Each structure stands twice: as structure tokens, then as C-alpha cells.
């Protein structure tokens, strides 16, 4: 289906967000990360399934750890 609206692909969005984050000062980066943690805790506090949210967070952390390990194995 050909839509008249062009949506950005995931890679473009990730690259733009990464560039925006890299452009921040160290203090701004810490503040940004703190806001993300605060948002997670807020969502967990209002969720009707906080254990599912915690499980998803652990799974995401594990995927990130494995991605870093794979990167290091490829480039070490």
C-alpha cells in the first residue's frame, strides 16, 4: 500500500536519537538518563502488571548485554 505519508525507518530514528544524545554535555546526558529511570519507575508504579514490566526491563537489559558481548567478540 502506498501511503502519502513517509514514515522514518527505525534505523533513521535511532541514528538521530543517538546523534542528539552525543551532542549533549555530560551533565545533560546524566540528566537525560535520570529522567528515563524516573519514567520507568513512574510507569512501574501505575502499572497494573509491574512484574511484567520488570521482566521486560530485565530481558531488554540482557539483550543489550549480549549485543555488547557480541560486538566485543567481533572486534576484539
Image (tube, rainbow, N blue to C red):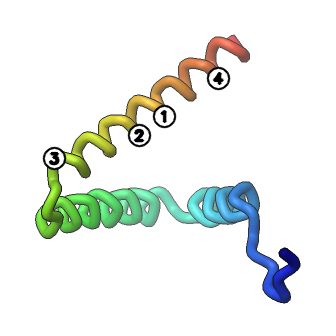
Q: Which residue is mark 4?
A: 71
Q: Residue 32, located in which quarter of the rendered image?
A: bottom left
SS assignment at label 2: helix
Discs 3, 4 touching: Cβ within 8 Å: no
For marks 4 and 1, the one nearer the N-term is 1
How far apart are labels 3 and 4 at the CA level? 30 Å
Q: Which residue is mark 1?
A: 64
Give residue 7's position: percent from left, percent from top. 75, 75
SS assignment at label 4: helix
Discs 3, 1 touching: Cβ within 8 Å: no
Q: Which residue is mark 3?
A: 51
Discs 1, 2 touching: Cβ within 8 Å: yes
Give residue 33's position: percent from left, percent from top. 38, 57
| Left/right of residue 16 with respect to residue 46 in the rendered view | right
Give residue 17's position: percent from left, percent from top. 62, 63
Foreground tag (3 vs 2):
3
- 76 versus 42 height, above or below: above
- Is 7 or 41 nearer to us in this picture? 7
In the rendered structure, find residue 60 and report the number of the disc placed on it: 2
How far apart are labels 3 and 1 at the CA level? 20 Å
Residue located 64% across and 12% down the image: 73
Amino acid at each position: 500500500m502506498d501511503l502519502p505519508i513517509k514514515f522514518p525507518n527505525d534505523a533513521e530514528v535511532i541514528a538521530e536519537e543517538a546523534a542528539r544524545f552525543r551532542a549533549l554535555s555530560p551533565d545533560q546526558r546524566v540528566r537525560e538518563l535520570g529522567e528515563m529511570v524516573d519514567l520507568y519507575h513512574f510507569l512501574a508504579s501505575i502499572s497494573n502488571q509491574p512484574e511484567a514490566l520488570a521482566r521486560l526491563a530485565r530481558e531488554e537489559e540482557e539483550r543489550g548485554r549480549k549485543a555488547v558481548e557480541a560486538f566485543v567478540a567481533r572486534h576484539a
